[in-house]
Image (cartoon, rainbow, N blue to C red):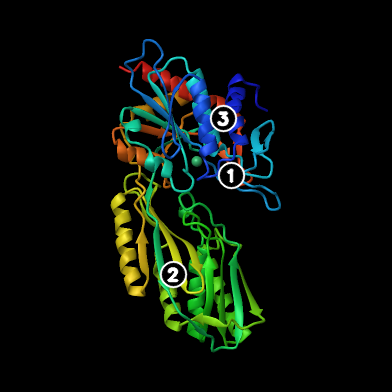
Amino acid sequence: MVKNSAIIDGVLAEFEPLTRIPRPSGHEKAVSDYLKKYLTDAGFTVVQDKVNNIIADKPATPGYEQAPRTILQGHMDMVCVAEEGVKFDPQHDAIKLHRTDEYLEAVGTSLGGDDGIGVAIGSYIMKHAREHGPLRLIVTVDEERGMTGSINLDGKYVKDAQFLINCDSENYDELTVGSAGSVHIDFSRKFTRVPAEGKQAWQLSLKGLKGGHSGERIGDGRGNAIRTLAQLLQGLEKQGHVELASFTGGKAPNAIPDAAAATFVTDMSCADLQAVIKAEKERFLTIYGGVDPEITLELTALKETSASVLQADDTNRLLTLLTVLHTGVYAMSTVIPGLIETSANLGVLQMDEDEVRVQFFPRSAIDAKLDEFVAMAGELAELTGFTLHASDKAPGWKENKNSRLAKIMAETFEEQNGKPMKVETIHAGLECGYHFMRNPQLDMVSIGVTTVDIHSPNEKVMLATIEPQVKLIETTLQKIAKLK
Ligand SMILES: [Zn+2]
């Protein structure tokens, strides 16, 4: 049971209007207009830039005009997902809130606590903090989809500040001090379909893997559905002639694929097919069974023979690419024990009538390792006859061992909560990477209230963590104002 608290009520009063304005990534105009008016009415100097980022400035409280500027930063967009069977139009419908003793959650949909609560805390602090140097709130758009808000943010807004507190993390007792960079790599290949020679068409679906966010879960030893099914198809190829008609899997480049499916034509008997599938499943369980025991492989005979299939050469090239491409952890950090330094995720496989496309997503704390991946992918594309497209790199945020901000915050947290804060660098990406790229001198941390199951209909905010978070930021601002 959470005590009634003016701070909790105050922060929720900032958050509640955000839940009434639909704000999926890429559709932030309305919420951006709301924030512009709201923060202007509150007395701040507000800029709405060309991509709808909001930058609000508040002068120092009297006597602290000489103190360094601190930025509070969050993002206004959210991941909109609904429970199966719930009617929800993310571009038009409001979020329905439900408050229990312990949590704030939404009815049937994601809550948007990520990062609406971060934004609410930012505006609450702007209005209520009593002792601070110059303060700026930056609320970006489109963090969840492509970080285009941060990409397009004018560098001048982070160059005249000394400290930045990003409010987009998920545990109130964790202090993030570094994050990974990444690059989107796409392989594509055109092919011509030919009539199948074999008689019987089959569908083979692989399901039941855990999947998960590739920045957070890539080190857990989970299976990759696309890779596993590609290996299985190669296994079938060794036993008899298999003509591939379709092969798809995965949902997003940054999600470990939990399912994949293929259809193919062959004259192999059902028993022979099942024998290979059984052997492949056993092989999978030997490697991944400890973490991913729920794998299912379902073979279904199709009534109609698929009229057209890929030529054998196209199939071989695709299966080679999918089985050789590195997926999973690539290297551990030599500087921070236990941190994954570099990983890659074979994330999505799409196939239509005449083209196949593979999305591959490496992450690394070291920018040069991303270049290495792009080069390796280029060689592999050439060997397998695919066309390669690599995006610009999303920059990493390198930990600053001498961060004054991290020291102040960790000390303050311990004073206020009687336990140490966990300080860590993460393998996922944060907008801080772009701020760091523009101003490597900027001293940053990322924090957040405890939020459970983000990006899912079960998302909820732990109410008891709001007050300690607000107090942590307010005291930190006070200490910064008094820095010599
Ligand atoms: Zn977020």
Which-is-in-front pick, marks 2 and 3?
2
- SS class of the residue under badge 1? loop
Q: Tell which circle, 2 or 3, labels the residue nearer the N-terminal end.
A: 2
Residue plotted at (40% across, 47% down): 338
Q: What amino acid is found at the position of numbered circle 2 in the picture?
A: Leu
Q: Tell which circle, 1 or 3, labels the residue nearer the N-terminal end.
A: 1
Q: Tell which circle, 1 or 2, labels the residue nearer the N-terminal end.
A: 2
What residue is shown with label 2?
322
- Name the spot of residue 60 as percent of width and height, x first: 39, 16
Q: What amino acid is found at the position of numbered circle 1 in the picture?
A: Asp
- SS class of the residue under badge 3? helix
- What is the quadrant of residue 211 in the picture? bottom right
Q: Quadrant of the N terminus?
A: top right
What residue is shown with label 1?
453
Q: Please state which of residues 354 and 280 is positioned toward the viewer in this rendering.
A: 354
Total numbered circles: 3
Q: Quadrant of the C terminus?
A: top left
- Name the spot of residue 204 as percent of width and height, x first: 59, 74
Q: CA distance from mark 1 to mark 2?
A: 30 Å
Left or right: 20 as drawn, with respect to 51: right
- SS class of the residue under badge 2? helix
- Name the spot of residue 421 as percent of width and height, x first: 46, 31
- Give above or below for 190 relative to 108: below
Residue 360 can be seen in this image: yes
Residue 418 can be seen in this image: no
Q: CA distance from mark 1 to mark 3?
A: 16 Å
Q: What amino acid is found at the position of numbered circle 3 in the picture?
A: Thr
Say whether marks 1 and 3 touch (CB < 8 Å).
no
Residue plotted at (69% across, 33% down): 100
